[in-house]
Each structure stands twice: as structure tokens, then as C-alpha cells.
Amino acid sequence: MESPCVTLLAIGNELVFGKIVDTNSAAIAQATYAEGLRMRRVVLCSDSCAEIVAELKRAAEDSSLIIT
């Protein structure tokens, strides 16, 4: 049986513009892997509602779990 796929959506203009380093995504990816889950992708997304909705819809198409 194939492991469930995870998409991680890291949201924040400060991430997109490089004002802070996204260390949470690496930690979450390690934790999900340790639990037997496959990380499909990690997405950095601005604070734009339209962009967030678009990325959530995309993730829902091919991921069993979405982490925001």
C-alpha cells in the first residue's frame, strides 16, 4: 500500500520575500516522513487570499493531507 501524500503550504509574505527563513517546513517534512507519510510538495504562498485558495485547491487534487 502506498503511503499517504502530504502537501505543506507555508503561508506568509515574510517567507515569500525572504525576510525570514522557513525552518518549519524542514522540521514538518522530517516529522511526516518519520510517521510514514510522503511529502508531495512544499509550497511557499503569499498572504493573498486568492493565492491561498488556488494552492489549497491544487493540493486537494493530489494529496491525502494538507498542512498549513
Image (tube, rainbow, N blue to C red):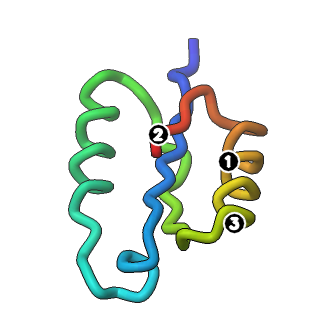
User: From mark 1 to mark 3, how far is it between C-alphas?
Assistant: 9 Å
| 61 relative to 20, above or below | above
Q: Residue furthest top?
A: 1
Question: Of the residues shown, which amino acid type is indicated by label 2?
Answer: Ile
Q: Quadrant of residue 61?
A: top right
- The first of marks 3 and 2 along the sequence is 3
The residue where tag 3 is placed is: 51
| 53 relative to 46, above or below | above
Marks 3,2: beta carbons within 8 A: no
User: From mark 1 to mark 2, how far is it between C-alphas?
Assistant: 10 Å
Rate crowding at label 2 as few (under 14), some (14 to 19) or many (20 or more) other CA atoms within 10 Å: few
The residue where tag 2 is placed is: 67
Q: Quadrant of residue 37?
A: top left
- Report helix, strand or loop for mark 3: helix
| 33 relative to 27, above or below | above
Question: Of the residues shown, which amino acid type is indicated by label 3?
Answer: Glu
Marks 1,3: beta carbons within 8 A: no
The residue where tag 1 is placed is: 56
User: From mark 3 to mark 2, how far is it between C-alphas?
Assistant: 16 Å
- Report helix, strand or loop for mark 1: helix
Of 20 and 25, which appears nearest the observer?
A: 20
- The first of marks 1 and 2 along the sequence is 1
